[in-house]
């Protein structure tokens, strides 16, 4: 019988986002497997769900970028020692520095194994290099694997490619929202009734491609007036000027009535499920890009710019949905053909949540089987 482990995951906060959701999924899985799960963060809206799943949350401002945060090192070191932590899994750079400095000063024969996950194309410098200090390093796409190998002095043997995963229970193929949800949606957005909907789920920031999306809807409207675009995502602090810029651009192109800005939606699954097409138009390559595979899991076709982790997903599941980065005309032409004759989206794909969770635990076991490093 395999030993039961105490795993601590560390990240800045538990508000929202792919890293946070992945942390919760791993935490819930560990508890289900009989392990002890702890998450250290500054807290946030997801703490309630974390604790409901049986994990412990320790509140520390460990992601606060200040020298004062280094004062947490003794308390963290004491917690790791007193609670006999087996695995210390760090998911962000500043917390990684705090954790590494605490971990490095512990007895190498009894300290936990240090795991890091590289979630993005961090700037190449000494600060970011901390994410390669794990005894085992998880990379979330082949793009990230190549980025780490090309920019940091790290052995390929330390890297494990572990794609983010989607639950087929949370995103079942062919899912349709219930009548009550539909009623609430059409009450709030009557402009979408009887329209063919194209959705761009992404927080409002310039590199996520909202401006390109507006151009695509404008091109589609010329020959397909029944089309309606949904821009779904958080308007973060300091980004309201960009939202107003996008609205002015839509008005300039004469499509204000063909675009809805929904803001943050906790029911993004339902919004994607009522859409005819979902788009992924990030101008910079995404490390993974979770909404694309979530839409494909629902059976909703996706049109995506061909780079980054999203291109890896699309190549495996729906390669016909890839278009050149920034080519709004190609995207509009493909969308027009799909609105007339939708493509067939495969019912299965390799990016499953169960694969991601099993692989994460395998990385933990692999690290524990290694000799303690001095």
Image (tube, rainbow, N blue to C red):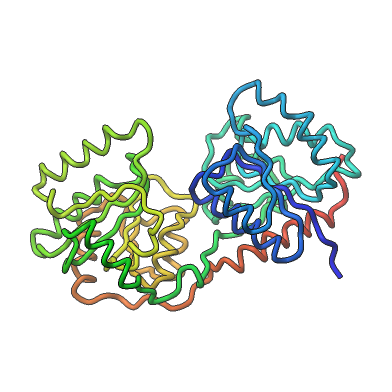
Task: Give above or below for 180 relative to 18.
Answer: below
Pick whichever, 151 or 103, lies toward us: 103
Displayed quadrant of residue 235: top left
- Tell which of 318 and 25 is nearer to you: 25
- Please name the residue shown 60% across and 54% down the image: 24
Left or right: 243 as drawn, with respect to 31: left
Residue 367 occupies quadrant: bottom right
**Which quarter of the rendering shows the N terminus?**
bottom right
Left or right, 310 with respect to 335, comes to right
Q: Quadrant of the C terminus?
A: top right
Give the x, y percent position of residue 195.
17, 66
At 43% from the left and 66% from the top, the residue drawn is 315
x and y percentages locating residue 301 in the rendered image = 33, 69
Q: Residue at x 35, y 70 (%)?
A: 177
The one nearer the camera, 231 or 138, is 231
Residue visible at 16% across and 41% down in the picture: 249
Residue 44: give x, y in percent of width and height.
Answer: 54, 42
């Amino acid at each position: 019988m395999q030993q039961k482990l105490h795993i601590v995951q560390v990240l800045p906060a538990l508000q929202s986002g792919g890293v946070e959701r992945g942390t919760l999924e791993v935490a819930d899985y560990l508890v289900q497997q009989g392990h002890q799960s702890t998450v250290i963060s500054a807290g946030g809206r997801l703490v309630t769900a974390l604790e409901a799943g049986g994990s412990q949350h320790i509140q520390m401002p460990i992601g606060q970028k200040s020298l004062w945060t280094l004062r947490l090192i003794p308390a963290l070191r004491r917690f790791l020692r007193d609670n006999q932590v087996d695995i210390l899994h760090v998911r962000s750079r500043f917390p990684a520095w705090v954790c590494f400095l605490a971990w490095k000063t512990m007895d190498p024969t009894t300290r936990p194994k240090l795991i890091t996950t590289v979630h993005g194309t961090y700037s190449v410098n000494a600060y970011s290099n901390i994410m390669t200090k794990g005894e085992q390093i998880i990379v979330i796409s082949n793009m990230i694997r190549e980025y780490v190998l090309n920019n940091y002095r790290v052995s390929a043997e330390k890297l494990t490619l572990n794609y983010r995963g989607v639950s087929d229970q949370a995103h079942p193929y062919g899912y349709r929202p219930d009548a009550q949800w539909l009623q609430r949606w059409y009450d709030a957005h009557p402009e979408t009734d009887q329209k063919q909907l194209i959705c761009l789920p992404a927080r409002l920031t310039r590199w996520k491609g909202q401006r390109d999306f507006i151009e695509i809807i404008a091109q589609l409207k010329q020959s397909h007036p029944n089309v309606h675009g949904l821009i779904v995502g958080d308007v973060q602090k300091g980004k309201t000027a960009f939202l107003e810029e996008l609205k002015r651009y839509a008005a300039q192109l004469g499509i204000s009535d063909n675009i809805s800005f929904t803001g943050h939606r906790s029911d993004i699954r339902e919004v994607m499920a009522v859409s005819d097409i979902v788009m992924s138009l990030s101008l910079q390559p995404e490390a993974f890009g979770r909404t694309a595979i979530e839409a494909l899991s629902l059976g909703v076709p996706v049109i995506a710019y061909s780079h980054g982790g999203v291109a890896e997903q699309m190549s495996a599941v729906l390669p016909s949905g890839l278009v050149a980065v920034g080519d709004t005309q190609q995207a509009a032409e493909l969308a027009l053909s799909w609105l007339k004759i939708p493509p067939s989206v495969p019912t299965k794909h390799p990016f499953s949540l169960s694969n991601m969770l099993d692989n994460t635990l395998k990385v933990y076991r692999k690290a524990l089987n290694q000799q303690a490093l001095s």
